Amino acid sequence: MTQTTNSGPLRIGIVGSGFIANFHLTSLIAVRNCTVAGVYSPTPANREAFALRANELGLGPAQAFDSLADMVTSPDVDAVWLLMPNDARLPVMREIHGLVTSGKAKLAGLACEKPLGRTLTEAKEMLSLVEDAGLNHGYLENQVYSTAVKRGKEIIWRRAAPSTGRPYLARAAEEHAGPHEPWFWRGDKQGGGVLLDMMCHSVEVARYLLTQPGEGRDSLRLKTANATVSSLKWTRPKYAAELKERMGDEVDFLRNPVEDFARCTLTLESADGEELMIESTTSWAYVGAGLRIQLELLGPEYAMEFNSLGTGLKVFMSRAVTGSEGEDLVEKQNAEQGLMPVLEDEAGVYGYTDENRDMVESFRNGTKPLETFHDGVAVIEILMALYKSAETGRTVEFPAADLDDYIPVPARAAA
C-alpha cells in the first residue's frame, strides 16, 4: 500500500457529483478524521455546486478540479472515492492506475461504489489495477454496513446460533419505482437493469448475514444460481412513453428495454458442509411510500427481520396540505399526502455512515476494510451467473468457468 495518513484526517477526492455522491457527502458529516478535499466530474457546474455544498456542510476546504489528473495528483488528496456512472468506472480506474504507478500520484486508498464492473471481466480488471498500483481498496456496499444489519447479525450469531445452529436462509429484497438518471435505464451504460443495479446489494448483504463473524464471505462456497427476470411495468406503452418523456429520447423501452424485476435463488455450502440458501427479489416497479428494503435471516429456532419502511416515525398530511414533490421523508418518495414513513437518518439506516467510517479508518491506518474489491468481484460473478440463468432458463452450477466473457442480454441489445 502506498501510504497511510493516521497522523491526520484523510483528505478525500470524489469522482462524481450526482445522487449517490451527495448521499455519501451527507453521511460524511458523521464521520471523524476526514475532510472532502476535492471533487471532479465532467460538468463544471455540477462539480462547482458539489464543492460548494461540501464547504457549506463544513467538510472542506473542497476544491472543484478541472480534470481527474489534477485532483488525483494534488498533494491535498489522500484517497479517492469513485462515485460516477457504471460505464465510466473502468476508464477512470485505468487513468488513476497510470498516475499512481508513474509516481505522479500518491494515495492511501481507493473506494468504489457498487457495482465494481458491468461484467466479470471489468470487475477483475478493476481489482487487478488497484492491486498493481499498491492501493488499499474498499468496495462501497452500504447495506452490509446498515445499522439494522450490523445489530441484527450480532444478536443472532451471539445469542441464537451457538445453542441451536447457524442460520441457513437469508432473504433480501429491495424495491422502488425506478432510478433518477437516464443512464440507469440504458443497458449499454448501466450494464443491465434492476438485477445489476440492486441485486448486487441483496446478494452481498445476504452472504454477509449468513457468514459467521470473523470469517470472510469466501468461507461460503457457492453451489448454484437460478434467476428469472422480466420487464413488468416499463414496457407497457403508457409507461414507456412516460419514461421517455422524463428521461429523454435516449431511453426507449419499446425498443431497448431492461428488466425492472428480478428474482434469484442461490445455494451455498458452509465450511462444515451445511447447505444454505439465499432468496432475493428486486424491482423498479414497486409503487409504495418509497424505497423498501426487506431482510430476513432464519435459523433452526430463530428469525430476524427488517423493513426499512417500518419506521418508528410517521407523519400524516391531509388533502389540504399542498406543495412541491420531493424526497425529504424517504428515498424515492412517491407521495406528499397521507400517512407516510420518515427515515430520520437515511445515511445511517442505509449504512453509508458506517461504510465511510470503515473506509476512512482503514485507509488512515493501512488496514483492510470489511468490503474490498475482492468482494466486488465475487458479487459480479454471482450476478453474471444469475443473468445467464435467466437467459438460458437453466440453473448455473459453480464453478462456472465461462462467465468472464458473458454480457447480459440488455447490455448486448443496447450496444
Image (cartoon, rainbow, N blue to C red):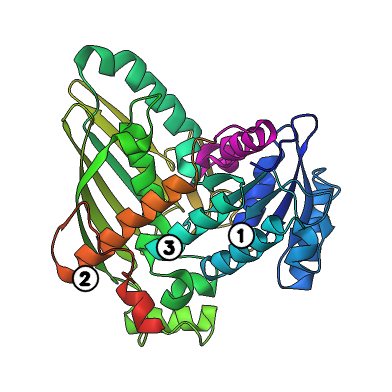
The reply, left or right, for residue 368 in relation to residue 81 is left
**Residue 324, located in which quarter of the rendered image?**
bottom right
Give the mark nearest the N terminus, 3 or 2.
3
Q: Which mark is residue 177?
A: 3
Left or right of residue 314, residue 93 in this image:
right
Nearest to the observer: residue 186 or residue 148: 186
- Residue 256, percent from left and from top: 37, 83
The crowd level at tag 3 (other Cα within 10 Å; few <14, some 14-19, many 20+) is: many
Q: In this rendering, which labeled residue sits more in front, label 2 or label 1?
A: 2
Q: In x, y percent, where is residue 291?
A: 45, 52
Distance between the Cα atoms at labels 2 and 1?
31 Å
Q: Earlier in the sequence, mark 2 or mark 1?
A: 1
Q: Earlier in the sequence, mark 1 or mark 3?
A: 1
- Residue 16 can be seen, yes or no: no
- Which stretch is magenta? 340-368
Residue hosting label 1: 19
Is 87 above or below relative to 252? above
Q: Nearer the viewer, residue 292 or 64?
A: 64
Element at badge 2?
helix
Image position, residue 123 (x, y; %): 45, 59
Magenta stretch encompasses residue 256: no
Q: Position of residue 339 (x, y in %)?
A: 47, 46
In the image, what residue type sits under mark 1? Phe
Q: Which residue is mark 2?
A: 391
